[in-house]
Image (cartoon, rainbow, N blue to C red):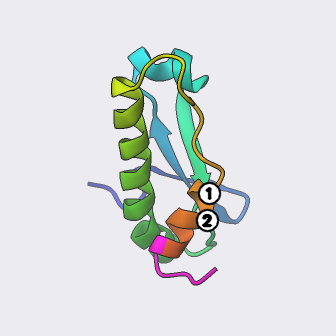
Amino acid sequence: MRKTQYLQQLGHSWYLRVKVPTTLQGRVGSTHIRRALGTRDLDEAVRRKWAALAQVRTYLDQLRTAAPHLQTSLPTTFAISCTQSAGNPG
């Protein structure tokens, strides 16, 4: 597995980038989910991506089983929580 799998660099910052399954793209409204990892350092981004990836996968799993009228966007606390769960206090 390559080091930058699920990572995308925009400018100097690193982002998690996950393809949305075709069956969920209509509900998500996009073909990919991209979330800031809050770092410019590749090694730190690699460490942080696993917690962020787990959250995105949980979100997609919930969408698969949720009723169609339920919320289809990631919670606004997503970026904050993936940064905090990666060991960054804020």
Q: Position of residue 3 (x, y in %)?
A: 37, 61
Q: Amino acid at mark 1?
A: Thr
Q: Magenta segment, principal secondary structure?
A: loop
Q: Nearer the viewer, residue 6 or 54?
A: 54
Determine which of the numbered discs, if any, sits on residue 80 in the image. Answer: 2
Which residue: 51% across, 64% down? 82
Q: Is residue 1 positioned above or below 21 on the image? A: below
Give the magenta range: 85-90
Q: Is residue 65 above or below residue 50?
A: above
Q: Determine if the magenta segment contains residue 86.
A: yes
Q: Image point 45% across, 21% down: which residue?
A: 24
Q: Quadrant of the C terminus?
A: bottom right
Label 1, residues with CA under 10 Å away: few <14, some 14-19, many ≥20: few
* Whole-percent x, y for residue 16 in the image: 52, 52
In the image, is 14 to the left or to the right of 47? right
| Residue receiving disc 1 | 77
Occupied quadrant, residue 73: top right
